[in-house]
Image (cartoon, helix red, strand yellow):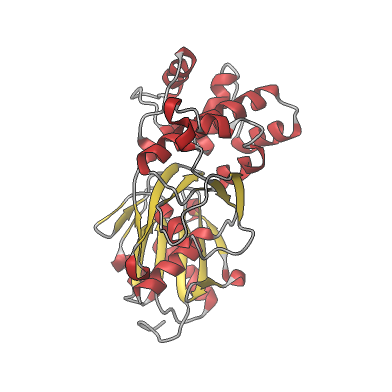
């Protein structure tokens, strides 16, 4: 490896709570054949994981950008559901390049918008079209191992600002006594029921456990039982899950006014995508009292490209020059 090798591909990585995807990219275009998935539990940290990838690739690296499922502050990423801490010095050691960048995973999804392949988006709610020549805000919402969202602003001069957040740890919206009982059941030792405690893979499991009176099933089995129609508890759980998803994303729509659309992403969001309409997502999303008509103006789509965050990392690094 050599420092900032001209015309060399860049390394991009999407670091989730369970798995890390790594690839090479030329400019904003990810090389599909270069994508590899690693199980995080097999590594003490990111540096040896990237070292293994580059050793196998046997290629000089012209830069690196990673997307981390956790807060990024002052250039340091701390994983929310994994004891990893990453900064620019680590990326330079691992890749040999000083051209490095670190994003929150939802920021990477925001940078991917406009660079995804045709057919990567599934429409859930059509919304109202944006005014020609305008650049309205957009919102990406991630539902996977965790939950989070980021707002996307396109600025003058082709620049893009994607703001980070940790909204998955905000309070779960509760409408009635049944919701309150659920919150108490999943609140854990501290008694706090955050959005992520329901709207995530482990949240789906917790919701099923409460609905089933204590009986537990892994998230994959819950989805299998729901899709096969063989588990009535899974069907009920799925409806609860989608109701909360609609309520939370509707709240975020009113907070951020993303007239450019809302984009759901993440493995759990993709799994539910074919079923959202049947399970009542549009009604739950628009259930905002006298602001219901306004909320209906926001289009909702699901990003079905599993590697969108890698594209976002490549686009962000390319925009930095």
In the rendered image, residue 137, in percent from the top left (x then y), is placed at 40, 52
195 over 124 or under it: above or below = above
For this orientation, the residue located farthest to the front is: 132
Q: Is residue 218 left or right of residue 144?
A: right
Quadrant containing the C terminus in the rendered view = bottom left
Front in this rendered view, residue 231 or 20? 231
82 over 174 or under it: above or below = below
Residue, x 41% and y 79% (percent of image)? 62
Residue, x 56% and y 26% (percent of image)? 240
* Residue 205 appears in the picture as rendered: no
State the image quarter where residue 94 is shown.
Answer: bottom left
In the rendered image, residue 89, in percent from the top left (x then y), is placed at 29, 68
* Residue 63 appears in the picture as rendered: yes
Front in this rendered view, residue 66 or 143? 143
State the image quarter where residue 186 is shown.
Answer: top left
Front in this rendered view, residue 33 or 129? 129
200 over 303 or under it: above or below = above
Quadrant containing the N terminus in the rendered view = bottom left
State the image quarter where residue 60 is shown.
Answer: bottom left
In the rendered image, residue 238, in percent from the top left (x then y), is placed at 61, 30
In the rendered image, residue 71, in percent from the top left (x then y), is placed at 33, 49
Front in this rendered view, residue 299 or 273? 299
Residue, x 47% and y 37% (percent of image)? 295
Residue, x 62% and y 71% (percent of image)? 33
6 over 213 or under it: above or below = below
Q: Is residue 275 left or right of residue 159?
A: right
């Amino acid at each position: 490896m050599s420092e900032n090798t001209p015309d060399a591909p860049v390394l991009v990585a999407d670091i989730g709570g369970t798995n890390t995807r790594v690839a090479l990219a030329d400019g904003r275009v990810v090389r599909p054949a270069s994508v590899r998935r690693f199980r995080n539990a097999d590594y003490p940290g990111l540096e040896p994981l990237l070292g293994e990838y580059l050793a196998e690739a046997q290629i000089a690296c012209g830069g690196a950008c990673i997307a981390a499922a956790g807060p990024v502050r002052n250039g340091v990423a701390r994983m929310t559901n994994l004891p990893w801490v990453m900064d620019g010095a680590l990326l330079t050691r691992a890749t040999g390049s000083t051209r490095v960048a670190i994003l929150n995973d939802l920021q990477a999804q925001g940078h991917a918008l406009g660079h995804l392949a045709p057919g990567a988006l599934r429409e859930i709610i059509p919304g109202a079209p944006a005014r020609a020549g305008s650049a309205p805000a957009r919102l990406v919402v991630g539902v996977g191992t965790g939950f989070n969202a980021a707002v996307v602003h396109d600025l003058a001069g082709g620049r893009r600002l994607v703001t980070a957040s940790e909204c998955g740890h905000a309070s779960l919206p509760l409408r009635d006594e049944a919701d309150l009982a659920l919150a108490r059941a999943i609140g854990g030792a501290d008694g706090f029921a955050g959005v992520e405690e329901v709207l995530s893979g482990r949240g789906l499991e917790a919701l099923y456990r409460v609905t089933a009176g204590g009986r537990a099933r892994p998230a994959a089995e819950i989805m299998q039982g729901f899709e096969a129609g063989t588990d009535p508890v899974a069907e009920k759980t799925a409806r609860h899950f989608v109701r909360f998803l609609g309520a939370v994303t509707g709240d975020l729509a009113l907070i951020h006014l993303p007239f450019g659309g809302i984009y759901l992403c993440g493995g759990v969001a993709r799994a539910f995508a074919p079923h959202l309409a049947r399970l009542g997502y549009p009604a739950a999303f628009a259930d905002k009292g006298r602001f219901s008509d306004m909320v209906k103006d926001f289009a909702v789509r699901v990003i079905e490209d599993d590697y969108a965050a890698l594209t976002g990392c490549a686009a962000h690094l390319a925009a930095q020059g």
